Amino acid sequence: MKHIARLALTALLFASGAAHAQQGEIKVGEINSYSALPGFTEPYRKGMELALKQINDAGGIKGKKLVVITKDDGGKPGDALTAANELVSRDGVVMIAGGFLSNIGLALSDFAKQKKILYVAAEPLTDAIVWSKGNDYTFRLRTSNYMQASMLAEEAAKLPAKKWATIAPNYEFGQSFVAAFKDLLKKKRPDVEFVAEQWPPLNKIDAGPVLQAIDAAKPDAILNATFAGDLVKLVREGNTRGVFKDRAVVSYLTGEPEYLDPLKTETPEGWIVTGYPWYAIDTPEHKAFLDAYQQLNKDYPRLGSVVGYATVKTIAAVLTATDDHSTDGLVKAMKNLKVDTPFGAVVYRAGDHQSTMGAYVGKTAQKDGKGIMVDIQFKKGADYLPPEAEAAKLRPAN
């Protein structure tokens, strides 16, 4: 109940009196899985709040205050659609943004298409949202499944491993990531084979039987795409059973602090991961973000913080780029829109509506009883996307 009360209060403060909106405000809607996945979404909210404060302190959008009205979808597509309807029909927002789970992102994308309203998908990673099910009204910020699979397959191809097994949550995100990784790795290493797949339900993994089945297949290497509580259970059980011993592991998202931090001294050594080593990034744009974030929150950022911050920066950038805040005007302005983020400038490609945000790849290690990333590399998003003309062919014909 405390969490729900805090969520309601924060949304009210975040909206800054949106119920009594004045002429000097521009309202946008934001929907996310705040109660279902607080490990990511609470830092995400803090990143949004920082960006919103910076924008409004600097004069807002051409003198108008930017107001973000947040809604909690509880991790359920139906609730996300209810929230989207309320934001558009009752609150009168000019666009919607957010989303965490890929199935929710796809539902909001379809809503945007049906209602003809701009949707900036913040976190959903499925490739379908910009390719096979892409539409004119949806643009995606986060480095996609295909992009991060490409980055990880590049590293996996260097391993001597030939026999692979996969573990991923059984919904759109996990399915599309595994499919992309398998295809990309086989193109780089035609000699590899996949000898086992495990598809535990999201947030309900029974790690013992999953790992028993993986171990029985005797793979040389394991691809893992579980996250949050499922990841903790998998690592704990895998360490106990010795399943990861003498096997290479490639683990999607595991280097993100929100997923790495809970592992503490259980953090495995040497896993190849994507993540966010905030403590080791030495660029001017990240330093400015880190200093401002820590000053406001008295805490270090998580990857969600970067995504939330960049989402609101995207909203501000498109609203500033055009005086036409109709859906058609905003959609037009989103194409090839350049946005400054803590990871550097990104561009929302006109060809497939995917941003060029990059990602960090490295290996897991332990330091002072905590999990960290070492041997980090920043991989530019544009380098891991197909050319725009090719990507555009993956989208439905209008």
Image (cartoon, rainbow, N blue to C red):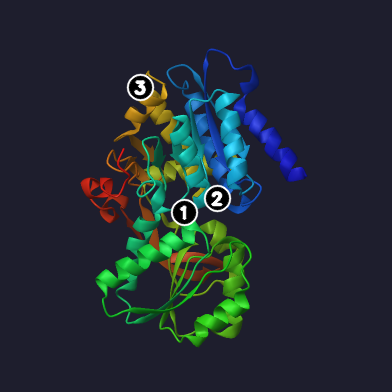
> How much space separates mark 3 and mark 2, taking CA atoms?
34 Å
Is there a contact, CB below 8 Å, between mark 3 and mark 2? no
Q: How crowded is the residue under tag 1: few (<14 C-alpha within 10 Å), some, or many (20+)?
A: some
> How much space separates mark 2 and mark 1, taking CA atoms?
8 Å
Which is nearer the N-term, disc 2 or disc 1? 1
Tag 2, which secondary structure?
loop
> How much space separates mark 3 and mark 1, taking CA atoms?
33 Å
Q: Amino acid at mark 2?
A: Tyr
Residue located at (57% from left, 51% from top): 40
| Disc sitting over residue 322 in the figure | 3
Is any part of residue 281 visible from this angle? yes
Across and down, in percent, residue 300 comes to 55, 50
Is any part of residue 274 visible from this angle? no
Q: How crowded is the residue under tag 3: few (<14 C-alpha within 10 Å), some, or many (20+)?
A: some
Q: Which residue is mark 2?
A: 300
Q: Amino acid at mark 1?
A: Trp
Nearer to me, 296 or 76: 76
Indicate the quadrant containing the C terminus: top left, top right, bottom left or bottom right.
top left
Tag 1, which secondary structure?
helix
Residue located at (48% from left, 57% from top): 172
Which is nearer the N-term, disc 3 or disc 2? 2
Image label count? 3
Indicate the quadrant containing the N terminus: top left, top right, bottom left or bottom right.
top right
Would residue 54 appear left or right of 329 to someone viewing this image? right
Image-quadrant location for residue 296? top right
Is there a contact, CB below 8 Å, between mark 2 and mark 1? yes
Image-quadrant location for residue 12? top right
Tag 3, which secondary structure?
loop
Q: Is residue 388 above or below residue 180?
A: above
Q: Which residue is mark 1?
A: 278
